[in-house]
Amino acid sequence: MKIMRVEKTLVSTNRIGELGHRPLLVVNDKPGGTPQVAVDAIGCIPGDWVICVGSSAAREAAGSKSYPSDLTIVGIIDQWSAE
C-alpha cells in the first residue's frame, strides 16, 4: 500500500471497454515526484490524501482480477501530515 495525494481528475473519453466508467485520477506520492494514474474506487477529490494498492490487489479492488488497473485508490485518509 502507498500513501498518495490526488492532484487532479484525468479525462479519457476513448478507452478500452474493460475500464468501464470508473474515474481516473492523477496521484503523486511526493511533491515533484512522478505522477501516476489511479482508478478511483471510492470517490475522491483533488487534494485528498489516499491509500493506494498496486498489482493484483489493484485489479481486485477495482472490480475483478481481469480489470486492467495497476493502481487503485482504496481509502481516503482522514488526517495526515506529509512531514
Image (tube, helix red, strand yellow):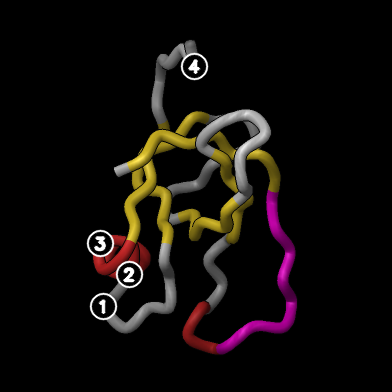
Q: Residue furthest front?
A: 33
First in sequence, mark 3 or 4: give its number.
3
Identity of the residue drawn at 40% across and 34% down: 3
Magenta highlight: main SS: loop
Percent of width and height locating residue 59: 32, 69
> Is 6 situated left or right of 68 in this image?
right
**Secondary structure under badge 4?**
loop
Q: CA distance from mark 3 to mark 4?
A: 25 Å
Residue beneath label 3, please? 57
Identity of the residue drawn at 54% across and 42% down: 44
Circle 2 packing at 10 Å, graded few (<14), some (14-19), many (20+), is many
Disc 4 marks which amino acid? Ala
Tag 3–tag 2 contact (CB < 8 Å): yes
Residue beneath label 1, please? 65
* Residue 56 belongs to magenta span: no
Q: Residue furthest bottom?
A: 17
Residue interval drawn in magenta: 9-16
Circle 3 packing at 10 Å, graded few (<14), some (14-19), many (20+), is some
Q: CA distance from mark 1 to mark 2?
A: 5 Å
Percent of width and height locating residue 69: 43, 70
> Is 18 situated left or right of 75 in this image?
right
Tag 1–tag 2 contact (CB < 8 Å): yes
Q: Which mark is residue 82?
A: 4
